[in-house]
Image: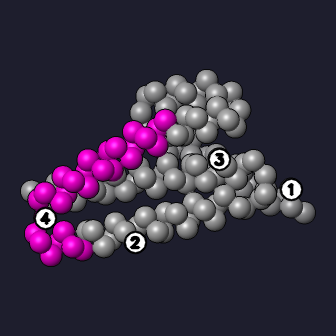
């Protein structure tokens, strides 16, 4: 019974992560292609891309903070703190779905996807504030 649930969940995770990969760096796509589906290799690719996306997030956060009003800055700071807690809880939950090594990919992919999406949102905010 568990295998029936795990296989569709695994396929869904891979398909959503693969489509999201199109918005990541070219190096990430190359790394994933070379990983040959080996979990440790894929995790290394995710960690390298996460560092880049996290740097983007931080740059865009600082940029947004530089163009917002004082009240908007407080709102953004509070929102960012809540987002960090949500990301930690959401991706932490995904790290416990099956009890297998695939959970590491679920969690890592979650963190990467959420960080990229937040970096995109902060980039948008920094442009709206201009």
Which numbered mark, 1 or 3, is in the foreground of this view? 3
Q: Residue at x 52, y 40 (%)?
A: 47
Image quadrant where one finds the N terminus: bottom right
- Looking at the image, tell me whether mark 2 or mark 3 is earlier in sequence order: 2
- Looking at the image, tell me whether mark 3 or mark 4 is earlier in sequence order: 4
Q: CA distance from mark 4 to mark 1?
A: 50 Å
Instruction: Let me know if residue 41 appears in the view.
Output: yes
Q: Considering the numbered disc 1 on the image, is that residue within a helix, a strand or a loop?
A: helix
Q: Tell which of 16 and 74 is nearer to you.
A: 74
Numbered label attached to residue 82: 2
Q: Position of residue 72 (x, y in %)?
A: 17, 72
Give the side of residue 79 with respect to residue 74, left or right: right
Q: CA distance from mark 1 to mark 3?
A: 17 Å
Q: CA distance from mark 3 to mark 4?
A: 36 Å
Q: CA distance from mark 1 to mark 2?
A: 35 Å
Numbered label attached to residue 71: none
Stretch of the chain drawn in magenta: 48-75
The residue that disc 1 covers is: 3
Q: Position of residue 102 (x, y in %)?
A: 72, 48
């Amino acid at each position: 019974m568990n295998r029936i649930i795990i296989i569709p969940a695994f396929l869904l995770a891979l398909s959503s992560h693969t489509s999201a990969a199109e918005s990541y760096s070219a190096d990430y796509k190359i790394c994933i292609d070379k990983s040959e589906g080996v979990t440790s290799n894929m995790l290394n690719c995710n960690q390298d891309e996460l560092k880049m996306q996290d740097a983007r997030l931080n740059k865009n956060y600082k940029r947004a903070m530089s163009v917002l009003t004082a009240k908007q800055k407080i709102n953004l700071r509070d929102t960012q703190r809540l987002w960090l807690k949500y990301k930690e809880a959401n991706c932490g939950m995904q790290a416990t779905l099956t009890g297998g090594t695939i959970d590491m990919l679920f969690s890592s992919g979650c963190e990467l996807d959420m960080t990229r999406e937040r970096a995109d949102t902060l980039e948008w905010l920094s442009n709206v504030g201009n």
